[in-house]
Image: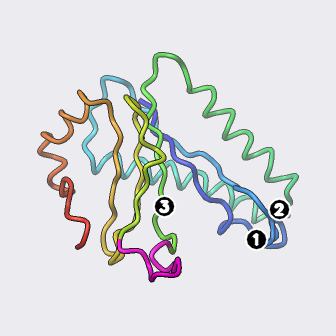
Amino acid sequence: MLMIQALDLRPRIPPAVLSKDAVGNLQAPFFLKEGSESKMEIAEIVAEFRKAKEVVNEMIKENLATTITATTLGPNLLSLLGKLASELTPDIDLFPMSSWCRKPFYEVDFGCGSPVWIGSTGHVIHNAVFVLLLDSKDGEDVEAWISLPGQDMSVLVREQEVFAYAVINPPVLI
């Protein structure tokens, strides 16, 4: 199993290295790899995933401690991508994730007021695995939009451990 998520580097890179006017995405992957026989609890997965994210943060901090430039940071980010690519094999179960948490989507006014609810349909692919994390409108909770093959989804919605952390299909207008 390989869980992967992109980490937004813009808030972590000083303006002297990356202009606020720069266009495009600047991301680095962080990931958690476990053997197929591993039976981690949800809390353990979250803790390990946070550690994996911290490895990327530490790499950036180490670069900041030295004289960071686009040319010194670039090779380290490419090294992370190379490490990820080396983990991708045909027999591995890949679980891509994205987090839109702490993004100001609910503050946007499209001319008819701010959104009542934010969601995404762009990541739903038939028989594919994908997890999208979003802040709830009140900012107190996190919504997890999970796309799984039908058979796996049937198992997930019956998993009692999930109910300790989540409400399945809560009402939109909370």
| 144 sits left or right of 79 in the view | left
Cα distance in 3D space between marks 3 and 2: 27 Å
Q: Residues within 10 Å of mark 3 (few under 14, many from 20)?
A: some
Residue at (15% x, 55% y) in the render: 164
> x, y (%) of residue 61?
68, 62
| 97 sits left or right of 155 in the view | right
Question: Which circle's residue, 3 or 2, is located before the other in the chain?
Answer: 2
Vertical order, 3 against 70 (above or below): above
Q: Secondary structure at mark 3?
A: loop
> x, y (%) of residue 7?
58, 54
The N terminus appears in which quarter of the rendering? top left
Residue at (25% x, 66% y) in the render: 172
> x, y (%) of residue 37?
30, 23
Q: Amino acid at mark 2?
A: Ile
Q: Residue furthest top?
A: 91
Is-magenta flag for residue 110? yes
Is-magenta flag for residue 124? no
Which label number is shown at residue 68?
Answer: 2
Q: Which is more toward the observer, 34 or 62?
A: 34
Give residue 155's quadrant in the image. top left
Question: Which circle's residue, 3 or 1, is located before the other in the chain?
Answer: 1
Q: Residues within 10 Å of mark 1 (few under 14, many from 20)?
A: some
Cα distance in 3D space between marks 3 and 1: 22 Å
Q: Which is more toward the observer, 17 or 127?
A: 127
Task: Name the residue that disc number 3 marks.
Answer: 100
Q: Are marks 2 and 1 in contact (CB under 8 Å)?
A: yes
Which label number is shown at residue 14?
Answer: 1
Residue at (52% x, 47% y) in the render: 5
